[in-house]
Amino acid sequence: GKSSLDSQTATTLKDEQNRMDPTAAILGALASGADASIADSFAFAGSNGLDHNAVVGASKSLQGDAYVSLSELSTQFYVLGKEAEDIVKNGSQEIRVLGALIEAGDEGLTIPELQEKVGKDVSKIGMGNCMKLKWAKKDKASGKLIAAAGSDTQDGVKEQLSALQNAPEGDNANVLDDKTLKDLKRRKLVSLITRKSYKITRGAEYAPQRVKKAADLTKEMLDSGKWKETTFKEYNFQTLGESVGGGYLHPLLKVRAEFRKILLEMGFSEMPTNKWVESSFWNFDTLFQPQSHPARDAHDTFFIKEPASTVSIPEEYYDRVKTMHEEGGSGSIGYRCVFKREEATKNLLRTHTTAVSSQMLYKLANQPGGFKPAKYFSIDRVFRNESMDATHLCEFHQVEGLVADYNLSLGDLIGTIETFFRKIGITQLRFKPAFNPYTEPSMEVFGYHPDLKKWTEIGNSGMFRPEMLAPMGLPENVRVIAWGLSLERPTMIKYRIDNIRNLFGHKVDLAMTRNAPICRFDDVEIETNEEEKVPVA
């Protein structure tokens, strides 16, 4: 007795495990003989209380190891929609409308009365079908709907839908004729479903239990000798390895690389701009920007809380800058203001890379052997406390170039700017007088945009003021010409981007970065008249 009971319990538990595990259930169903098969995976899943998708997944996994073979089956059948199920339960709309009209008798019903009796939706569909089948007519005198004499009250639509619903599951495609099915589909009462399933038979490597094949030969297998009894998966030496996703250069970096190459070709040297935090002294004061200037307010500049102040300023240079602000010099009367050290030592996120330019010029003036002409450029990030919109962010990249040499003029500045922009394909330039605190004269640079067909501002420029250069210790006849532009605007034009937030920031589409083409600017040669040696276009 007890051993027999234990055996029955073990068999029951094993059957239950097979029901829960699709792989075990499939292999168990094929264990009865070499010709055993599962005729339809969908029916098999239903009879074993399994999800059909789980059965299909397990079957394909077993097929990969040759435990089973699969033959695809396709079954078409019709399913009823919600409206069709309502018709099977309550009758078709036309029958319900006809019933209401028969009940009203010769007096008939107005459309509002009919809607009140059977509902607006039923009335709308049923009335049209009744008129089409000539089950109802409209009285010309009263305008009411009346049931036609001898109307057939047999509900054919309900009978057709009931026939589909009562047919064996998944086997109702041939219950009705094609014309009837077409009419039901036109009314969107039924829809044709195609179900994919599989016939499952034994494969070449069939076994009642699946043994997981090892994918890798491990050190532990070699040490223990277990590799001798382990079954390994076959290696496919023809297959390609998984593609390795590499890094991609952002469009800004592509344009930056091109600008950098152009400036190096023009003989410029790159300035070190890796220090984003500057003191107000280098960012504003050395540029002869007054301490009362609105740009130095918190609503325009990001000030640092910790550390709030710098601890290192060249004292002799600081005194000369202070004197220039308070008393003037080099033909200037200065700002006649009280120059405050606590204002000069405030730390901030630099608002322009000109803070680095001033440091480079100071070193140039005080280097061993004295001043020597130089050309510098930088391309790096700057920060402004601005409202963000489609064309403005709180941080952007500034391209800046400067030339320090003896007796430079405005013509040298215009020529340098034209050379640079010609190398990036912009030949039509205009210069407009402007004001900057630390340059005089100053000019805004405008370029003609061929896509927008209008002139647009593309940069700013000027000659550094004597009040800025004299405290550095530069010789009196040294002039410094400088110009700058943002990196974002030419990048947006180059890559046809209309919103800066789609170029830089957390909203950038990574696919755009991955698929952005290479950046190339063509140097445009300007044709000249050989006799007059002047530009033609």
Image (cartoon, rainbow, N blue to C red):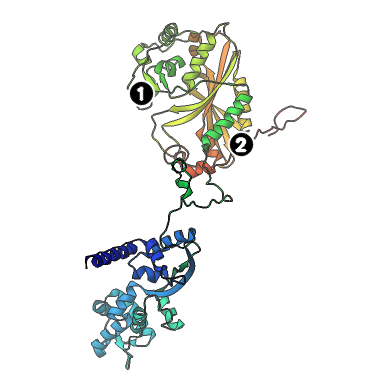
- Using the image as rendered, state which of residue 110 and residue 398 is in the foreground: 398
Rendered location of residue 414, percent (x, y) = 60, 24
Q: Quadrant where the C terminus lies?
A: top right
Rendered location of residue 380, percent (x, y) = 49, 27
- Using the image as rendered, state which of residue 78 and residue 1 is in the foreground: 1
Callout 2 crowding tier (Cα within 10 Å): few <14, some 14–19, many ≥20:
some
- Using the image as rendered, state which of residue 284 and residue 203 is in the foreground: 203
Rendered location of residue 163, percent (x, y) = 36, 82
Residue 443 shows in this picture: no
Residue 3 shows in this picture: yes
- Mark 2 or 1: in front is 2
Tell me if residue 267 comes above or below residue 367 in the rendering: below
Tell me if residue 317 comes above or below residue 52 in the rendering: above
- Which residue corresponds to the image point at 31% horizontal and 78% vertical from the top-left? 87
Q: Which residue is mark 2?
A: 520
Judging from the image, what secondary structure is the residue with disc 1 in?
loop
Location of residue 286 (image quadrant): top left
Callout 2 amino acid: Arg
Q: Quadrant where the N terminus lies?
A: bottom left
- Using the image as rendered, state which of residue 377 and residue 405 is in the foreground: 377
Judging from the image, what secondary structure is the residue with disc 2 in?
loop
Callout 1 amino acid: Phe
Rendered location of residue 85, percent (x, y) = 31, 75
Q: Give yes or no for contact between labels 2 and 1 (Cβ–Cβ under 8 Å).
A: no
Tell me if residue 210 comes above or below residue 434 in the rendering: below
| Residue 303, numbered circle | 1
